[in-house]
Structures are given as C-alpha cells and as structure tokens.
Image (spheres, rainbow, N blue to C red):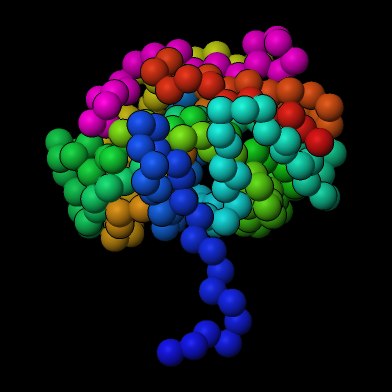
Amino acid sequence: MLSVIQNPPRVALPIVGSSDLFPVRRVYCVGRNYAAHAREMGADPDREPPFFFMKPADALQIVGSEPTPHPYPSKTKSYHFEVEMVAALGGGGTDIPVADALDHVYGYAIGLDMTRRDVQDEAKKLSRPWDTAKAADGSGPIGALHPVSLIGHLARGEITLSVDGQTRQTGDLGDMIWSVAEQIAYLSGYFALQPGDLIFTGTPSGVGPVERGQRMVAAIAGLGAITLDVV
Ligand code: MN
C-alpha cells in the first residue's frame, strides 16, 4: 500500500560499540526528581508523587561526539538547560513491579530537557499544558546509547552541565527521588510501555538560561559527555 505523503523518518539513536540503531517510540519525562531542583522550582520534594509529561520523539536532536550546533527556538526569552540521564527501554509491559523494572532497560544516554521557561511559567500560572514549553523542535538533545550489556546499570555517579566552561548543574544519580526502576513501574501503571520508549529521568539543581553563542557540555559518569553550541 502506498502512503499519500512521504513516510516521516523514524528517529533512531546511535549505539556505542555498534553500527546498529535504536528506534525511538515515545519520550516520557519526569518532573522535579532531585530534591534540590524541586526546591529551586518552589515545590516540596517530600510530599509530591512523581509526575510525567512527554516530548514528541521527533523533538529529539541526535548528538554525536563532536560539538553540535543547537538552534535557539522561537517564542522564548528564557531558554533553560536541564541535563538528565535517559533510560531507553528494550522491553515493556503494564504494571511492571519495581523489582523487575530494570530488566526492561536496554541502555542509558545523556539527554537535555531544553525548556522555554518563560512559557512554562505562564502555563503553570494559567493551569495550562506544558507542550509549548517542553516540546520545541530540537528540545531534546541526546547522545549515543550505552547498552546495559556494556556498562551495567547506573545507580550512582556525577551528572553535570557547564556553560562556557563554568559548572552550572551538579548532582549525583543516586540523589533521584524516584529511581529509574520506580519510574518505570509507576509509568507502566498508566501506559503500556514498549521497546523503543525513552524516559528522561529528571534534572539536578542549577537550571538556568542559555544564550546564542554559548557552549553547553553535559556529562554523566560512565556515559561521557555531549557538547552543544547554541546558535
Ligand atoms: Mn526535565
């Protein structure tokens, strides 16, 4: 059967140590998953259950090992960085127990949940959805996938973001309020998770704006680093 328009390309991540690709289905993102970041956003990290939003898969920007131009989006004067570890699912299901959840992880990558913060602040004030704040084209830069078969699971390790050589965000993966396993278990109560799904697992404190002409370097222990030049 023919398609009446050209089939849209499927977003796929490169895999470290392989020439194969990881095709992406959905992109889930958790909010306020590090206590210090929850506090800087004016929330109480001790009382809130996790919450999630989504980015469209085609809002991802695939980033290689070289510095990569990152276009500053329209309609914002406050474009914020949020460095996050991304878990990529090779399995899935519904109502997955926490104890089994990590069996469904294929690998991990470095991601950025780039955000039109001024648009998000307005949406929060008006109790409106976050899509225009969180789903800008290119707003999900992501590096190559590191398979669990090569690196194991990442429960601890430094996660940082620098702008023009100055460290702006620092945290430890061990400081997540909801672990990767707990996020998978929780999400699988709402959605049938599938191979190809990604989860952006939250950002540590220190989020802030970036301007055209600045260089961002996002790094996670065990996953290397990705470099973006905002243009
Ligand atoms: Mn985020």
Res. 207 visible in picture? no
* Residue 44 drawn above or below residue 171: below
* Residue 45 drawn above or below residue 31: above
Quarter assignment of residue 179: top left
At x 16% / y 44%, what residue is drawn? 97
At x 73% / y 36%, what residue is drawn? 69
Q: Which residue lies furthest to the front in this view?
A: 19
How far from the left and from the top, in percent, is residue 48? 43, 36
At x 56% / y 28%, what residue is drawn? 65
In this picture, residue 84 sits left or right of residue 222: right
How far from the left and from the top, in percent, is residue 199? 41, 43
* Residue 71 drawn above or below residue 154: below
Seen from the viewer's position, the closer of residues 92 and 150 is 150
| Quarter that holds the N terminus | bottom left
Q: Give the range drawn in magenta.
A: 148-167
In this picture, residue 117 sits left or right of residue 195: right
How far from the left and from the top, in percent, is residue 17? 36, 31
Res. 162 visible in picture? yes
How far from the left and from the top, in percent, is residue 171? 49, 15
Magenta stretch encompasses residue 163? yes
Quarter assignment of residue 152: top left
Q: How many marks?
A: 0
Seen from the viewer's position, the closer of residues 136 and 151 is 151
In this picture, residue 120 sits left or right of residue 221: right
* Residue 83 drawn above or below residue 23: above
At x 76% / y 42%, what residue is drawn? 71
In this picture, residue 227 sits left or right of residue 75: left
Seen from the viewer's position, the closer of residues 112 and 127 is 112
Magenta stretch encompasses residue 196? no
| Quarter that holds the C terminus | top right
